[in-house]
């Protein structure tokens, strides 16, 4: 249990500093926007690019890894969608947003800082493999589904263009693709460039956690709590549980199973709010879901780490 505390305590303290600083007015929304832009548009993309270029991946099949993570993700997404639509009687678009919140992990602000810290640097390869298609697949699927739901009678001629523009404007996706393409050239990186990337990478974890804490200070519990609780249960417990059992059945190695399970255990990602705001579909549900999911993940992630350590 002390290992769990030692892993999570610095993460929680950094996030709490960001939260308190924002609540007290020392760190305002304009400050957070600037730091967030640095994290999302510069620091994390540079970290992903340099890590991919310098990785020496083991020559093993990755099919079971992707299946273990993305099959449960798709199922949890559909469960959230149908519960929102059939039981909660929400619109098709809002039901899609609920499905997104139930299945989309906070990979950047929590997954990347926490998972290598808990599992070691060897966790980076399977983690980056999963993240490399995380945004592409989910962003595309959700955008297509929402546009179809909203434009049933208006035509979908602009849909491919909209999806493509969304993908190529995402710095995380661009950096991963660029990293894989650069690695194919076998050119490598100059030592000066490597040192520069290393300097940037050391800033990712504290900056990301500070932004996460500050963001939580801006969110609040509002509107209907029912959908947010449902999303939290699906995201924090059902998703990692399904990944763990499927990964175990498929025979994933201990490390890869741990990475996939921990990534699934990350709370609801900020993209739920971005989609809700973009389409003006119940942003209060999104902020409440992110807040409850993130706070409760302190407990659920601790439980996941204990299970993985004793599994």
Image: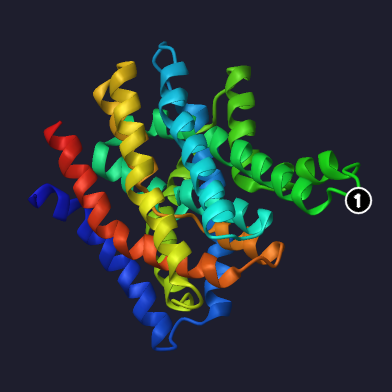
**Observer able to see residue 138:** yes
Q: Position of residue 112 (x, y in %)?
A: 41, 46
* Residue 78 position (above or below residue 8): above
Give the tally of numbered discs.
1
Q: What residue is drawn where x is 21% and y is 51%? A: 302
Q: Identify the element where label 1 is drawn.
A: loop
Between residue 48 and residue 137, name the one nearer to us.
Answer: 137
Does residue 298 appear left or right of residue 2 in this picture?
right
State how the image is colored.
rainbow
Q: What residue is drawn where x is 73% and y is 43%? A: 144
**Observer able to see residue 290:** no
* Label 1, residues with CA under 10 Å away: few <14, some 14-19, many ≥20: few
* Residue 155 position (above or below residue 29): above
Q: Quadrant of residue 307?
A: top left
Does residue 225 appear left or right of residue 283 in this picture?
left
Q: Position of residue 143 (x, y in %)?
A: 70, 47
């Amino acid at each position: 249990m002390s290992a769990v505390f030692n892993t999570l305590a610095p993460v929680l303290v950094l996030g709490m500093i960001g939260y308190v600083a924002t609540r007290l007015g020392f760190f305002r929304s304009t400050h957070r926007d600037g730091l967030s832009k640095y994290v999302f548009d510069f620091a994390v993309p540079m970290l992903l690019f340099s890590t991919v270029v310098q990785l020496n991946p083991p020559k093993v099949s990755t099919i079971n890894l992707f299946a273990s993570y993305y099959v449960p993700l798709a199922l949890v997404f559909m469960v959230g969608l149908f519960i929102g639509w059939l039981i909660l009687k929400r619109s098709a678009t809002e039901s899609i947003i609920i499905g997104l919140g139930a299945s989309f992990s906070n990979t950047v602000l929590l997954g990347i800082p926490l998972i290598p810290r808990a599992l070691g640097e060897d966790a980076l390869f399977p983690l980056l493999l999963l993240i490399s298609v995380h945004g592409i697949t989910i962003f595309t699927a959700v955008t297509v589904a929402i546009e179809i739901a909203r434009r049933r009678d208006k035509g979908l001629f602009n849909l491919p263009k909209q999806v493509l523009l969304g993908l190529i404007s995402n710095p995380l996706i661009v950096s991963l693709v660029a990293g894989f393409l650069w690695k194919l050239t076998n050119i490598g990186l100059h030592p000066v460039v490597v040192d520069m990337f290393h300097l940037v990478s050391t800033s990712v974890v504290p900056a990301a956690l500070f932004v996460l804490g500050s963001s939580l200070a801006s969110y609040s519990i509002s509107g209907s709590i029912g959908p947010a609780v449902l999303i939290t249960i699906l995201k924090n417990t059902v998703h990692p549980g399904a990944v763990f059992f499927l990964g175990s059945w498929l025979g994933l190695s201990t490390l890869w199973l741990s990475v996939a399970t921990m990534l699934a255990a990350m709370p609801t990602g900020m993209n739920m709010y971005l989609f809700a705001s973009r389409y003006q579909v119940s942003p209060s549900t999104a902020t409440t879901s992110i807040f409850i999911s993130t706070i409760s993940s302190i407990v659920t992630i601790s439980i996941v780490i204990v299970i993985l350590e004793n599994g």
